[in-house]
Amino acid sequence: MAIRLIRAPLPGMFYRRPSPDEAVFIEEAGTLEAGGCIGLVEVMKSFLSITDDEGGILRRFLVEDGASVDVDDPIAEIE
Amino acid sequence: MRIRKLFIANRGEIAVRIIRSAKALGIQTVQAASDADLEMLACKLADNVVNVGPAQALKSYLSIDRMMEAILASGADAVHPGYGFLSENPRFAEQVEKAGLTFVGPRAETIAIMGDKARAREEAIKAGVPVVPGTRGRVADLGEARRAALEIGYPVMIKASAGGGGRGIRVAHNADELEKQLPLAMAEARAAFGDDGLYLERFIARARHVEVQILGDGESVIHLYERECSIQRNRQKIWEEAPAIMLPEATRTALCQSATALARRVGYRSAGTLEYLYDDASGEFFFIEMNTRIQVEHPVTEAVTGIDIVEAQLRIASGELLWLRQEEISLSGHALEVRINAENPTKNFMPSPGLVTGYTPPETQRFDTLLYEGCRIVPYYDSLIGKLIVHCDNRAAALIALRQSIETLRIEGIHTTIPLHRRLAQDPDVVAGTVHTGWLVEWMARQPG
């Protein structure tokens, strides 16, 4: 299976959890359903879900939880 | 105590606005800036700039510790909190006071009282200010709910005591509906919040948002009349006016007097705003909450009264007693303000940060902004990038001036809400003034595409 990159749709702050005291959307090596959500980008006080249409095995995250990302920055590898 | 050096614990257009009034009073300015904001317009205009931490607001503009450290290191003797961020945080105001510095705003204690919805409502009732009619606490059973609803008047909202953010609310238009809804609401509240306590409040379907600007020096209080901000999206105001569009004169007087009564009761110092719902149908108004800070839409009041509200805040903070009597405040003409946000109105208001490649300010009218050609709109904070304010002899003339002025404003490189305002400015309902707080959402649903 090919490895693809999931990229940031907008610049902002990347979060792996819906809120600080909740569990992460998905663990590394976890299975993502088609259209599933891997995290949020906070941009100008709104939160956008980062989803993947195809789904697959989420190999690893390329940015830390809470890190700042630019548009098109790779966020995770999916297989 | 005269302010010599003012620390601005905020960013964006309001920081620029505060610097303007500080300069006019001969006050030196120190601008707070996160790592992401070092190139912002306010930093170019201030006498000094202090880095207050990383881009994330929680670690910079919202961090009391970081902010206090920066304030103390800067040698400033006063702090202006702007709006949002720490402006209504009583602990921040208290720390500024404890450090022996001047907080440009009310006392920490006043912020705490008015920031607590239940306490603010209590104070309003004690000051004789109408609040949205409702039960004083929980209703025990259906019988009590029925009696209360009759007193309050239908339609009523059934609200969960433990609820919030719009959750756990049902509407009953008559006793039959109340009987059906109450047990359901109770079960829902128990499931959602682990507490089946309910209370009732009058449901006002088509209310206008009207608010009164006040100034207090800790003893006397005056009002600068009202603003209307009924055109809202997701509870965010996007278009504001002064005076209110169709408020009967007697109602205006009663409304403004109620605001000064409440502000006087809490010994209010500085500029503040009391927000109300106004029910066109019944002519009643109800206090909802007080904002103990400068507001985004303050310029429309400045336009119609000729009073610089930020300058007034600084003078009051310096210890001056109110230099104006109520009789000296008069209204002249009509002012409109539209908020220009870095959002794409054709794509469900998707935020649109980025590089501003071209910028021409509007001709002749006031434009409060953080923009300059080549500036970067960063993704970390609010999307407000400018406020276009027009002031004319009457509302019809102001609408014409707005339509003309908005055509001369050019912002390139990012999406903005200018196209939305272009359409609103000629919409028949807006022109007629027949708007309410739910109007914009209905209007957007009617738009093609």
Image: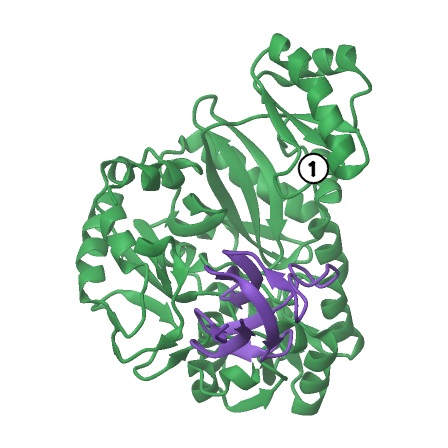
Compared across the picture, whether B367 is left or right of B263 comes to: left
- In the image, residue B52 lies at what x, y percent? 63, 84
Please state, as top left, top right, bottom left or bottom right, where the C terminus of chain B lies in the image. top left
Instruction: Decide if residue B59 is in sight here.
Output: yes
Q: Give the total of numbered labels.
A: 1
Residues packed near mark 1 inside 10 Å, few (<14), some (14 to 19) or many (20 plus):
some
- In the image, residue B202 lies at what x, y percent? 60, 24
Q: Considering only vertical position in the picture, is B153 above or below B338? A: above
Residue, x 69% and y 37% (percent of image)? B127
Nearest the eye: A77 or B274:
A77
Mark 1: which secondary structure? Answer: loop
Residue, x 43% and y 64% (percent of image)? B384
Determine which residue is flagged by label 1: B127
- In the image, residue B399 lies at what x, y percent? 23, 49
Compared across the picture, whether A8 is left or right of B339 comes to: right
Amino acid, disc 1 = Ala
Nearest the eye: B318 or B121:
B121
Q: Considering only vertical position in the picture, is B173 above or below B185? A: above
- Chain B, chosen colour in render: green
Give the chain letter at badge 1.
B
Chain shown in purple = A
Instruction: Decide if residue A40 is in sight here.
Output: no
Compared across the picture, whether B149 is left or right of B306 comes to: right
Q: Considering only vertical position in the picture, is B324 above or below A41? A: above
Nearest the eye: B316 or A62:
A62
